[in-house]
Image (spheres, grey):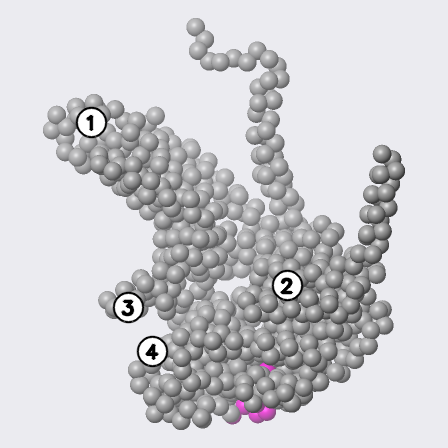
Amino acid sequence: MLARTTAVMVALFAGSAQAQTEIQWWHSMTGANNTGVNELASRFNASQKEYKVVPVFKGSYPESMTAAIAAFRAGNPPHILQVFEVGTATMMGAKGAIVPVAKVMADAREKFNPKDYLPTVTGYYSDSKGNMLSYPFNSSTIVFYLNKDAFKKAGLDPEKAPRTWKELSAAAAKLKASGQECVYSTGWPAWMHIENFSAWHNVPIGTKQNGMAGTDTEFSINSPLHVRHVSMLGDMAKKGLFTYSGRRNEAEARFASGECAMVTSSTGAQGTIRRTAKFDWSVNFIPYHDDVKGAPQNSIIGGASLWVMAKKPAADYKGVAKFFSFLSTPEIQMFWHTSTGYVPITQAAYEMTRKSGFYDKNPGAELAVKQLTNKAPTANSKGLRFGNYVQGREVIEEEMEAVFGGKKTAKEALDDAVRRGNEILRKFEAANK
Amino acid sequence: MEKRVVFRSAWLPYALVAPQIAITIVFFFLPAIQAGWYSFQLQDAFGERTQFVGLANFAALFRDSNYLHSFQVTAFFSAMVAGSGIAISLLLATMADRVIRGALVYRTLLIWPYAVASAVAGVLWLFLFAPSIGIITFALRSIGINWDWVLQGDQAMLLVVIAATWKQISYNFLFFLAGLQSIPKSLIEAAAIDGAGPGRRFWTIVFPLLSPTAFFLLVVNIVYAFFDTFGVIDATTQGGPAGATQILVYKVYYDGVKAADLGGSSAQSVILMVIVVALTVVQFRYIERKVQY
């Protein structure tokens, strides 16, 4: 009996000694992107024997972040957590809860050169000294979709997409006159009309380099240019030239169904549009105001990055580093980029995709990269880092809704957004001193 | 003769209520105390740094005009949900009580929505009323109503009130039906013989006899509207547009669960708890006096 027990125990120990180290990866990818995540993990697992990456879907971005916070408080966080871009400041503030990616790579002696990556992408996730804090996994940006058939019907040249807001307004009036019910709509209103709008026109969203240089930042989105833009949207809404669809990506479905002729939304929408749209369409640069000096600058990214959580056995981090190296290889990047619509994050992957001829067939996929790298990023267009921005963005969206619904003027709404937003920023500053 | 059952054992009664008390302590008192404790603290999301900030969380809330506005929204929302929920279910119950043929089918169908989860109810109404694809939207457009709750606060409020009420009607209906069936038929027949019409019979006999049920449902419905409706809101309007459907409990949920602001969220839940306790006390002190048992 004793001998048998001992034999079983020996077998167990031997088993565990040989077993692979599991790397838990919590993510929020659905649909085609979820398939992509599983494919990445199984390719990595097949490429070596020591580590096994286990992807776990944990719900939407805020849900998986909440789950990870609870798991961390209980002392058992995942190794890798996918966090959306607005959660960046919160993660950065949690110094004891995360391990900077640069440190993970250096400790594991993995080859790692931040210069290999696209600057607009890395800038968003690096500290002021240029150390990369999280791994830029799925980055998207906002682009301008146009229904060419609707343009033809309205007597407009479908090959000449409006480049400026003036041109867009003129085209909108013609589309309306041709019987188009929803002329222009937008997904992610704050991301498009405040965050990307500011970067595209090279004006600050907040002080301290949009919060990147310190938590004592304040919003500056009530500048005359911001007021003018939001007020223009309010006027367009009143005339029926702009239809508000909601705070998330609701507008994308309205474009794909042909209901709205022009939509600004995430590059990530291309997969769905390609599948469902029964009309000719194009992807274009987002419009700008041509009287603003220096515009257009470059757009900023959205999407999410991978954070490495603390409190894991030291040996596990080597596996995490190996996995990140694997993710950075051009072949893998190209696979992820071409199957999802997210942008490639390394120069090498971009070159490789271009040579493969993918962009000749899908010009929209390259346009996002071109828009992100339109000019070298400035302090205003590198990205943003505001604490508790989940709440902050909500405040901005609420105030924009008040303008579109005719309850407030653009000036009142943006002043209120700044006042309420700053209150949230001060609280974050106090909590993260 | 003593009619009450008296326990002779010193410990048995305590043992019998112990499970209930244990559940109340674990799932109500401990979290409530913890929320009270967190409401005086400022924490970062991961709980690494905790500071005691006294009443700062509360002060910040009352400086926020939008938070104050959400009191009005909550009051209106709760009154609408509780009021229309009780009125409609009372009407349905009196109707169902008079049905003779197929009564069971009607009753089952009327009770059905209660089995639907809040979030599912929300999504259901969301689809019916969706601004571009909803069936009801289509019908409303065809008669010239511009239905666009994504921007029109009043319409958004109407949507969440309908969704929240619809779910609660079944529950109210059950209680009203049971109450109606316990009213002796002879009383109503006697009144009818004396020449009282259906309306008169309802208001002078049925309604007073139902008042304990109605009072109980008033308390339960207000608590429901205050606490249990965030699923409906989360699935439909998420508090928008421009805070038009931002009820107190939804903000508690949003700030605490989605935005990881434990201090602010706890302070709000303490305020919410105080309001509901106060409301319940008022109901028992003033409205209950008018109830005839």
Q: Are marks 3 and 4 in contact (CB under 8 Å)?
A: no
Dominant SS type (magenta): loop
Q: Label 1 crowding class (10 Å Cα cut-off): few <14, some 14-19, many 20+?
A: some
> Mark on residue A27?
2
Query: Quarter holding the C terminus of chain B?
Result: top left
User: The disc numbered 2 marks a residue on which chain?
Assistant: A
Distance from label 1 to label 4 (Cα)? 58 Å
Amino acid beneath label 3 = Arg
Of the two numbered discs 3 and 1 in the rendering, the one whose residue sits closer to the viewer: 3
Viewer-closest of A289 and A246 = A246
Rendered view: A81 above or below B202? below
Viewer-closest of B274 and A306 = A306
> Mark on residue A181?
4
Distance from label 4 to label 2 (Cα)? 38 Å
Corner quadrant of residue B154 = bottom left
Give the labeled residue for mark 1. B188
User: The disc numbered 3 marks a residue on which chain?
Assistant: B
Q: Is residue B206 visible?
A: yes
Corner quadrant of residue A61 = bottom right
- Which residues lie in the magenta part? A291-299
Distance from label 2 to label 3 (Cα)? 41 Å
Q: Earlier in the sequence, mark 3 or mark 1?
A: 3
Amino acid beneath label 2 = His
Q: Earlier in the sequence, mark 4 or mark 2?
A: 2
Rendered view: B41 above or below A43? above
Q: Provide residue B251's location: percent of width, then percent of height.
A: 52, 55
